[in-house]
Image (tube, grey):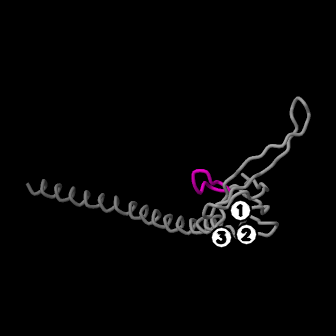
Amino acid sequence: MPRRILEGKVVSNKNDKTVSVLVERRYMHPVYKKYIKRTDKYAAHDEANICQTGDVVAIEECRPISKNKKWIVVTKNGEAIAAAPVEKKAESTEKAPAAKKASAKKTEEKKAVAKKAPAKKAATKKASAKKTVAKKEKE
């Protein structure tokens, strides 16, 4: 599912690594057909504390960082900002396939051992059966 990207104005940067972004949107009223302005305020993650009040920023939807923070600052005044949390997530997905391969090898080895083990048990049963038959013949 694509991530939403919104553009708005920074109204507060008082918190550490967090900025409040005011996003304004216009939509047509369904009955009166007049355009109405609606504003929403989002808490966005700003890793380097670069954004100042009044900056125009683009924010992108991401995984929840805290209770209210589910957005990350992508660009400031049209300039790209490095997004640290998104990059960390990409690195972790690259390591996962290698781990799956190692686990697949282990399961194959266990299956091979399991196939060999019942054959040995069956052989020991046959040998013990031969001994009992031999004892009966002696008597």
Q: Main secondary structure of the magenta part?
A: loop
- Which residue position is annotated with label 1? 73
Q: Residue at x 70, y 55 (%)?
A: 61
Residue 65 quadrant: bottom right
Secondary structure under tag 1 reads strand
The answer to whether 12 appears left or right of 38 in the picture is: left
Q: Residue at x 39, y 64 (%)?
A: 113
Q: Position of residue 84 (x, y in %)?
A: 64, 68
For this rendering, which residue is in front, 20 or 87?
A: 20
Q: Are marks 2 and 1 in contact (CB under 8 Å)?
A: yes
Secondary structure under tag 2 reads loop
Residue 89 quadrant: bottom right
Q: Which residues are magenta?
A: 62-71
The amino acid type of the residue labelled 2 equals Ile
Separation of residues labelled 2 and 3 (CA atoms) = 9 Å
For this rendering, which residue is in front, 17 or 93?
A: 17
Mark 2 or mark 3: whose residue is earlier in sequence: 3
Task: Confirm whether the magenta stretch covers residue 138.
Answer: no
Badge 1 crowding class, 10 Å Cα cut-off, few under 14, some 14 to 19, many 20 or more, is many
For this rendering, which residue is in front, 19 or 30?
A: 19
Mark 1 or mark 3: whose residue is earlier in sequence: 3
Q: Position of residue 51 (x, y in %)?
A: 72, 66
Q: Nearer the viewer, mark 2 or mark 3?
A: 3
Secondary structure under tag 3 reads loop
Separation of residues labelled 1 and 3 (CA atoms) = 10 Å
- Which residue position is annotated with label 3? 48
Q: Are marks 2 and 3 in contact (CB under 8 Å)?
A: yes
